[in-house]
Image (spheres, rainbow, N blue to C red):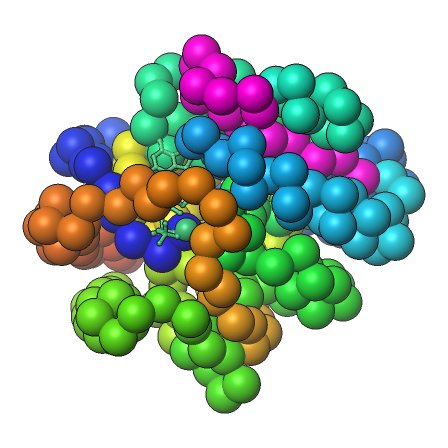
């Protein structure tokens, strides 16, 4: 995922504070939890692409750890044969809870995933399963690992106009929200399960990707982020769900909301020290 589609205000209201996330202990947690890695794929009419990527993803994840689960988070009512496909391939099929928006899929996926680590990936094949193998080794030394188009070695196969827009979004968000990473809008990331499950997420659309980053980065001092170079590929099949104008307008609304949220959290932290 790299852009915002149809979008409503993300509704970061007065109660939307950053959560204070307890420091997780991956090594110990791994011993206690039967699932080490959950891979979550939010999907909206993506059966065609899923058919192409799931076998490779399943094989790769099995090599990373035997204690893994793959979750496809579909729409509330199936819009294609994604349920049958998941059953055929032995992948967990999850129905979206709440609404049918991307934010609902992310919230449902995070609430369902049991892993010590949770990887989020697009279901359209833009996120090549092979890249997950490059993220995985960094989990012990970092709190968040991002597949990044904007560090040396990273790239994107999108058309020039989308690359330009994505660069603008990333530069503006990074500077305005003082984020310590270059790719703020790519959803392909590896999270510590306990950290990301503890977040209270309110954005409904693709802006939830930035919301997660802002909230995690502010959840504790010296939150460690690693960016691993990655190539964002063209979707493998199916249609885009992106709506360009709402994408641009929506992102600026989100920026304002996240900025106010961050400022309020800072004031509250100052007050409590
Ligand atoms: N727009 C949209 N995408 C969703 C939703 N739920 C899951 N997705 C998935 O989010 C991912 C990103 O959506 P895409 O339509 O690929 O958006 P994009 O990556 O910006 O655009 P293209 O790859 O160029 O089509 C895909 O895997 C979608 O299936 C939803 O409710 N709305
Ligand atoms: Mg896509």
Q: Quadrant of residue 131?
A: bottom right
Q: What percent of the width, then of the height, locates residue 194?
A: 62, 40
Where residue 33 sits in the image (x, y, percent)?
A: 82, 34
Residue 247 visible in the current orientation: yes
Residue 11 position within the rendered picture, expressed as x and y whole percent measured from the top left: 19, 32
Q: Nearer the viewer, residue 168 or 233?
A: 233
Residue 81 on the magenta span = yes
Q: Nearer the viewer, residue 270 or 138?
A: 138
Residue 185 in the figure: left or right of residue 166: right
- Would residue 66 be found to the left or right of residue 49 on screen? right
Residue shown at 61%/19% (left/top)? 83
Q: Position of residue 233 (x, y in %)?
A: 49, 64
Q: Residue at x 30, y 70 (%)?
A: 159
Residue 202 shown left or right of residue 60 in the figure: left
Q: How many marks?
A: 0
- What residue sits 52% from the left and 17% below the top? 95
Does residue 33 lie above or below 86 as drawn? Answer: below
109, 19: nearer the viewer = 109
Residue found at x 76% / y 67%: 137
Is 159 one of the magenta-colored residues? no
Quadrant placement of the C terminus: bottom left
Q: Is residue 21 visible?
A: no
Task: Give the residue at the far bottom of this rendering.
Answer: 152
Q: Which residues are magenta?
A: 68-82
Q: In the image as oriented, which residue stretches furthest toward the top?
A: 77
């Amino acid at each position: 995922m790299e852009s915002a589609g149809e979008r409503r205000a993300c509704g970061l209201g007065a109660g939307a504070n950053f959560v204070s996330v307890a420091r997780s202990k991956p090594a110990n947690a791994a011993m206690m939890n039967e699932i080490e890695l959950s891979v979550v794929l939010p999907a909206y009419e993506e059966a065609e692409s899923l058919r192409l990527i799931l076998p490779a993803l399943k094989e790769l994840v099995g090599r990373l750890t035997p204690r893994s689960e793959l979750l496809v988070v579909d729409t509330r009512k199936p819009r294609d044969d994604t349920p049958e496909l998941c059953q055929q391939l032995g992948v967990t099929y999850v129905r979206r809870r709440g609404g049918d928006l991307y934010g609902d899929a992310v919230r449902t996926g995070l609430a369902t995933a049991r892993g010590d680590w949770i990887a989020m990936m697009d279901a359209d094949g833009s996120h090549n399963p092979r890249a997950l193998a490059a993220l995985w080794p960094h989990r012990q030394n970092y709190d968040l690992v991002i597949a990044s188009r904007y560090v040396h070695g990273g790239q994107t196969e999108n058309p020039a106009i989308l690359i330009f827009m994505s660069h603008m979004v990333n530069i503006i968000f990074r500077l305005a929200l003082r984020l310590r990473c270059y790719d703020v809008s790519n959803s392909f990331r590896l999270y510590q399960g306990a950290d990301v499950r503890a977040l209270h997420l309110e954005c409904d659309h693709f802006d939830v990707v930035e919301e997660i980053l802002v909230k995690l980065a502010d959840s504790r001092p010296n939150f460690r982020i690693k960016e691993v170079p990655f190539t964002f590929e063209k979707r493998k099949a199916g249609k885009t769900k992106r709506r360009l104008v709402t994408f641009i307008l929506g992102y600026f609304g989100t920026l304002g909301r996240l900025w106010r949220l961050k400022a309020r959290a800072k004031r509250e932290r100052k007050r409590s020290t």
